[in-house]
Image (cartoon, helix red, strand yellow):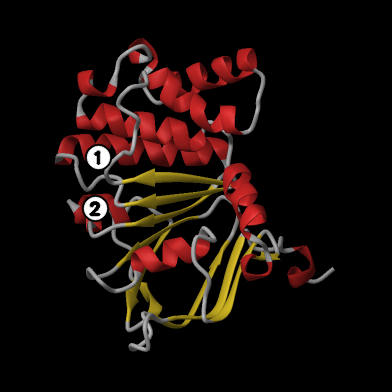
């Protein structure tokens, strides 16, 4: 049996991707990316380089002008809006720089939301959400409201919420951008540990060399394409 025959299909495969807006020069041009299940990749780039556009295309929130985005072998361009919504709900998790936790819900209630959208029975949802909060170091604070928590604690809730439904792909957009260095380091360590435990593939968008160094490999988005970047250690990134 050949090596190619035994290698699993990619979790995510992007080929010759192009996206432009309003007749301007394309933001993304002939962009390629392959992500295996369990692989953790960071993407760096200047503001306006197209990082958010790329995340939107991966999530099926936007459609490419040319090229393809295949998630578990399915081309998102061939799916309707409802199918894309179901795919995101079941297969993807999101972590944002601004946390996006709901201020009128407790930590536990925020983490329960993805499971409620999937109609997981209440008792099972509560057990899973509590376990996820515990793993993220928030077990003792599950009844607290966002106004009662620090930035690092809010990001821990965001990580728990992103992983509670066991997605195959995690998309993180500047998840440490609003945190101080100590809290950021704790969050990156937690995120890495949770990814190793769940086996989810992950893409981290960041401006931070320190954050990028937490990934298995780092790419730079420039000129509409992804360019391999020499990996640096976490110590070098500090």
Q: Is residue 194 above or below residue 169?
A: above
Q: Quadrant of residue 47?
A: bottom left
Query: Label 1, label 2: how many angstroms apart (C-alpha)?
Result: 8 Å
* Tag 2 secondary structure: helix
Mark count = 2
Question: What's the mark number on residue 81?
Answer: none
Q: Quadrant of residue 101?
A: top left
Name the side, left or right, on which 128 lies relative to 157. Answer: right
Name the side, left or right, on which 149 lies relative to 50. Answer: left
Q: Is residue 144 above or below residue 234?
A: above
Q: Residue furthest left?
A: 180
Question: What's the mark number on residue 185?
Answer: 1
Kindly identify which residue carries mark 2. 210
Q: Residue furthest right?
A: 1
* Tag 1 secondary structure: helix
Q: Position of residue 90 (x, y in %)?
A: 62, 43
Q: Position of residue 174 (x, y in %)?
A: 29, 52
Which residue is rendered at x = 23% and y = 70% of the image?
Answer: 46
Q: Position of residue 4 (x, y in %)?
A: 74, 71
């Amino acid at each position: 049996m050949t090596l190619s025959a035994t290698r699993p299909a990619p979790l995510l495969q992007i080929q010759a991707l192009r996206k432009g807006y309003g007749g301007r020069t394309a933001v993304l041009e002939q962009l390629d990316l392959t992500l295996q299940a369990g692989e953790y990749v960071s993407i760096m780039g200047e503001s306006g380089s197209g990082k958010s556009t790329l995340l939107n295309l991966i999530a099926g929130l936007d459609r490419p002008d040319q090229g393809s985005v295949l998630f578990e072998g399915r081309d998102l361009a061939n799916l309707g809006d409802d199918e894309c919504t179901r795919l995101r709900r079941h297969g993807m998790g999101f972590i944002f720089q601004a946390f996006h936790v709901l201020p009128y819900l407790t930590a536990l209630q925020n983490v329960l939301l993805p499971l409620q959208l999937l109609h997981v029975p209440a008792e099972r949802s509560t057990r899973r959400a509590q376990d996820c909060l515990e793993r993220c170091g928030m077990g003792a604070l599950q009844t607290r409201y966002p106004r009662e928590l620090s930035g690092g604690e809010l990001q821990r809730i965001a990580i728990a919420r992103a992983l509670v439904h066991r997605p195959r792909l995690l998309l993180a957009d500047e998840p440490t951008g609003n945190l101080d260095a100590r809290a950021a380091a704790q969050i990156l360590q937690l995120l890495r540990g949770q990814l190793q435990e769940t086996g989810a593939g992950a893409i981290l968008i960041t401006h931070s060399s320190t954050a990028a160094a937490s990934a298995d490999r780092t790419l730079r988005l420039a000129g509409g394409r992804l360019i391999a970047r020499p990996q640096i250690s976490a110590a070098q990134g500090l």
